[in-house]
Amino acid sequence: MLHFKLSRLREDIPALLKLAAPLLVGQLAVIAFGVLDTAMTARYSADDLAALAMASAIFISIYVGLTGVISALAPIAGQLFGAKRYDEIGEEVRQATWLALGLTILGCFVLMNADYLLAISRIKPEIEDKARLYLNILALGLPASMGMRVLMALHNAVSRPAVITVVQLAGLGLKLPLNLLFIYGGFGIEGMGGPGCAVATVIISWLWLIITLSFVLIDRFYSPFKIFSHFSKPDWHRIWALLKLGTPIGFSYLIEVTSFTFMSLFIARLGTTALAGHQIVANMGTVIYMVPLSLSIATMTLVSQSIGADKQERAEEIGWSSVFFTTTLCILIGIGVWLFKFELLDLYDPPSEVKVFSVPLFLFIAFYQVFDALQVTAAFILRAYRIAFWPMLIYAGSLWGVGLGGGYLMGFNVFGNTPKFLQGANGFWAGNSLSLGLAACFLLYLFRKTAARFEKTHPPIQV
């Protein structure tokens, strides 16, 4: 039975917005980091911008996969918080820290030995050297970034995302002056170009960790969790529980990132104008995606807390309320994007030929908002139920198979019968939209079946 009641929206929507608003601000602040890096490096030199693009693509792919594993702490701690088993939250945080340490060692090894990955691009040696330096510098900040991810998962689980948002905004305020200092030089420091962005990011990452740890240590709100009450050795049972949930989440993130990465690589074959137009629309899509993503994280928090409190029916109601609200909101955003497409394009001020090329793509970015909202909301609800393996398979089949595979067939007119409108970049965007729609259908079905099973069995929390 589908437990969605319109009367519940008045209660559920304010609760979702209260959590999602600071999450959205924080996500946009993080995106602003990349915008500043790109804009400021572009003014330094074209080679540095190329090195930044190459190194960033490698780092993001590694970072997203690793942090996805750590994000498993959020639904686990959220269930414990809902069950009022506060002291166990501290133990989960300590074990997640051990896991983060192990993943950090793995990530640092890859970042500091990325020659094979860099060689794939066949870029000029001087650009490759800058990209290698960029990755080596970021490796110094990876321990702080992974530690921060543990704390972010904790704060999401206990409904305190605003703490992280404030810290992120403070970091954004430091990003501009630090970039200026290390990219262009000053106060006796020689300019480093693109790698200077990495230095600024590493400094901010460590400051984030120190500030957030200090806050957790001092604020009485965290006392019941007993995070710092004692030292814990690695508990392989708890670490395995985190890995069992987190590994497929990490792979799901990786699938999403690589599907867009390869989409860009294929579209690059169509020429500079096509790639530029695609990048503008993709960038806009990323910013819009932060809305359903923030609402989905908030939904996961509320659903996991309800499950922990043994309120299975309430958990399902919150889930369906979020599906309805998030999708409705994204439909309105999609309509707005289509109506104001020319005004939005003017913000990027592209050459006229790029602008003409980009306009048809706005139909897809407006259209696929509904599917994107449905799939991301359902995926995060399932994570609240500690289900991530089947969603990972769904993502692999839809985003890689239908999205990339179908987009390739349409975009390059492999069979010679693709309609003109669906050839080129349009074909890839159409494939992506279809893949998200397919993923949404399977994930929503899985949510419905999972919620029904949970209501019947009322399983106790097993950590």
Image (cartoon, rainbow, N blue to C red):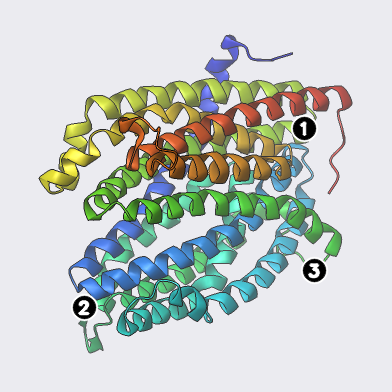
Instruction: Residue at 75% x, 32% y: name it.
Output: 307
Residue 372: x and y, percent?
A: 48, 33
- Residue on which disc 2 sits: 184
- Residue on which disc 1 sits: 309
Circle 2: residue type: Tyr
Q: Residues within 10 Å of mark 2 (few under 14, many from 20)?
A: some
State the CA–CA distance, disc 3 to disc 2: 45 Å
Comparing marks 2 and 1, which lies closer to the viewer? Answer: 2
- In this view of the protein, which residue sits in the foreground, 182 or 332? 332
Q: Residues within 10 Å of mark 3 (few under 14, many from 20)?
A: few
Q: Quadrant of the N terminus?
A: top right
Instruction: Residue at 63% x, 53% y: name it.
Output: 251
- Dividing the picture into quadrants, the one containing residue 110 is bottom right
Above or below 195: residue 389: above
- Residue on which disc 3 sits: 232
Q: Counting residues from the N terminus, which is met first, the one under dot 2 or under dot 1?
A: 2
Report if the CB atoms under discs 3 and 2 are less than 8 Å apart.
Answer: no
Q: Residues within 10 Å of mark 1 (few under 14, many from 20)?
A: many
* Residue 213 seen by the camera: no
Instruction: Residue at 59% x, 41% y: name it.
Output: 159
Circle 1: residue type: Ala
